């Protein structure tokens, strides 16, 4: 992954120094396990730790690379360099009864669990930011939209709470995904343990903080990895879900919220007035890259017989790239949410901008509760709601159109609550609902009707205080 989207803590997991260190630990622990059951001398296992337990410096890594140029085999290059460190006499016991995949797969899973621990910490940052903003805006009214069209009021706090619940599910999936890949295989060629005792695998697994793979075919089954990368893909989609909402709210004609714009920040090389949702757009792109790994990971599940290496090249790329990208994006999202600028006045203005039409369902339900059939109640409310839509079609720059509007449309344009105006003129409605009752339904305090269960929802999401 390019440095622009990389954070040091995560990239270090995938550096050669960490990889070779893990390879060494796997080999050394295996020697300890072999020594404990009497297969190799204890002095040999001890010497491997004493002479080989050195940092993988740039010089050591360069030497491994040099050997690989000749051997064309990375594991043999590694064990050859290790033998140079510990001496041929003791090195002959290294890799005893093991195959390359024992080391490679166990190492890869160890790296994925290391990466997962960082990602779980990142998820906690996002969750904390979402929770803080949810409680801050718990009862802040905003127009809810479906299909991009005004629906009924909700609150900004409920938006944040919904995203919080989604990321909490993502965290739980990630915990399970970590468990899924935290396995170790030291089972030898084709996974039969013919040349190495299963007790060695158990010993290495415990030392590496993993669990022994119940059955491996020379490689650890890749359905585990498919689930892991699928979970990362779902988390990426959840990130995009949040920032898509922010991108809409930052549109100039909406401006209900916007990304923090720092002093000295520039929005455009050409247009000095610009404030663009660049962080949200960046996260959208990064989410696409994380999801791009899901299909290759699924395709890696199918391998020939007991093993092939068609999965290897894929995992050498998607392992580092997806975890590094997600690590960067989650930290960016946490900061974006924490510093998001919110405009409650604009939200309220938008909510009140369409003549009270958002209370249409409330009138519909009141009619049905007072003896009107649902079909008739729907017709009454809909025809008046459609008049509200029509009344907003007045174009002040088009005199001909205004002349076509009837007097009622012109009168409605003078009212803040146009739904009340049209319903109050409806004779069919008057048979069931008095003007006083209608006014009580559509008064200025109607927002409390829409927000009365906010605390119930918050208790479900965050638990009772």
Image (cartoon, helix red, strand yellow):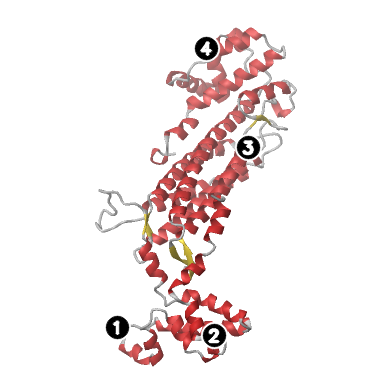
| Crowd band around label 1 with a 10 angstrom C-alpha radius: few (<14), some (14–19), many (20+) | few
Q: Is residue 61 left or right of residue 192?
A: left
Q: Earlier in the sequence, mark 3 or mark 1?
A: 3
Q: Nearer the viewer, mark 2 or mark 4?
A: 2
Residue drawn at point x = 43 percent, y = 18 percent: 59
Name the element at disc 1.
loop
Q: Earlier in the sequence, mark 1 or mark 4?
A: 4
Q: Position of residue 169 (x, y in %)?
A: 58, 49
Kindly identify which residue carries mark 4.
Answer: 85
> Is 106 above or below relative to 387?
above
> Is 340 above or below relative to 443?
above
Where, by quadrant of the figure, is residue 400 drawn? bottom left
Residue drawn at point x = 47 percent, y = 29 percent: 15
Residue drawn at point x = 40 percent, y = 61 percent: 249
Name the element at disc 4.
helix
Q: Nearer the viewer, mark 1 or mark 4?
A: 1
Which mark is on residue 179? 3
Which mark is on residue 297? none
Whole-Å distance between the Cαs marked 2 and 4? 92 Å
Residue drawn at point x = 45 percent, y = 45 percent: 329
Kindly identify which residue carries mark 2.
Answer: 433
| Crowd band around label 4 with a 10 angstrom C-alpha radius: few (<14), some (14–19), many (20+) | some
Q: Earlier in the sequence, mark 4 or mark 3?
A: 4
Q: Is residue 84 visible?
A: no
Whole-Å distance between the Cαs marked 4 and 3? 35 Å
Kindly identify which residue carries mark 1.
Answer: 397
Would you say the residues marked 1 and 2 are in contact, meaning their CB atoms lie under 8 Å apart? Answer: no
Q: Nearer the viewer, mark 4 or mark 3?
A: 3
Q: Position of residue 310 (x, y in %)?
A: 61, 38
> Is 374 above or below relative to 64?
below
Q: Earlier in the sequence, mark 2 or mark 4?
A: 4
């Amino acid at each position: 992954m390019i440095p622009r989207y990389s954070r040091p803590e995560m990239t270090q997991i995938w550096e050669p120094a960490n990889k070779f260190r893990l390879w060494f630990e796997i080999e050394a622990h295996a020697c300890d396990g072999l020594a404990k059951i009497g297969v190799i001398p204890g002095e040999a296992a001890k010497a491997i730790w004493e002479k080989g337990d050195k940092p993988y410096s740039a010089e050591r890594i360069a030497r491994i690379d040099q050997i690989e140029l000749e051997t064309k085999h990375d594991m043999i290059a590694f064990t050859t360099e290790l033998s140079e460190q510990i001496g041929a006499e003791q090195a002959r016991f290294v890799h005893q009864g093991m195959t390359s995949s024992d080391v490679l797969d166990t190492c890869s899973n160890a790296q994925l669990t290391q990466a997962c621990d960082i990602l779980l910490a990142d998820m906690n940052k996002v969750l904390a930011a979402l929770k803080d903003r949810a409680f801050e805006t718990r009862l802040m009214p905003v127009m809810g939209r479906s299909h991009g069209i005004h629906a009924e009021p909700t609150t900004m706090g409920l938006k944040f709470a919904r995203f919080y619940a989604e990321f909490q599910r993502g965290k739980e999936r990630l915990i399970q995904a970590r468990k899924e890949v935290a396995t170790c295989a030291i089972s030898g060629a084709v996974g039969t343990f013919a040349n190495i005792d299963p007790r060695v695998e158990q010993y290495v697994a415990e030392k590496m903080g993993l669990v022994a793979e119940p059955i491996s075919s020379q490689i650890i089954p890749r359905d585990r990895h498919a689930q892991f990368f699928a979970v990362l893909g779902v988390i990426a989609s959840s990130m995009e879900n949040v920032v898509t909402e922010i991108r809409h709210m930052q549109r100039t004609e909406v401006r209900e919220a916007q990304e923090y714009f720092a002093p000295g920040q520039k929005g455009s090389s050409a247009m000095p007035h610009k404030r663009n949702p660049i962080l949200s757009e960046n996260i959208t792109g990064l989410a696409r890259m994380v999801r791009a790994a899901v299909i290759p990971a699924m395709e890696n599940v199918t391998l020939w017989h007991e093993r092939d290496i068609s999965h290897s090249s894929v995992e050498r790329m998607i392992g580092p790239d997806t975890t590094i990208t997600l690590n960067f994006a989650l930290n960016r999202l946490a900061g974006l949410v924490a510093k998001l600028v919110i405009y409650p006045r604009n939200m309220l203005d938008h909510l009140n901008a369409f003549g009270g039409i958002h209370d249409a369902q409330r009138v519909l339900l009141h009619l049905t509760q007072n003896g009107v059939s649902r079909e008739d109640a729907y017709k009454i409310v809909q025809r008046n709601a459609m008049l509200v839509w029509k009344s907003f079609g007045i174009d002040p720059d088009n005199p001909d159109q205004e002349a076509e509007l009837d007097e009622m449309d012109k009168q409605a344009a003078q009212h803040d609550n146009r739904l009340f105006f049209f319903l109050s003129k409806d004779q069919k409605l008057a048979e069931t609902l008095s003007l006083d009752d209608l006014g009580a339904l559509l008064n200025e305090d109607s927002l409390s009707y829409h927000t009365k269960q906010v605390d119930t929802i918050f208790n479900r999401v965050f638990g009772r205080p």
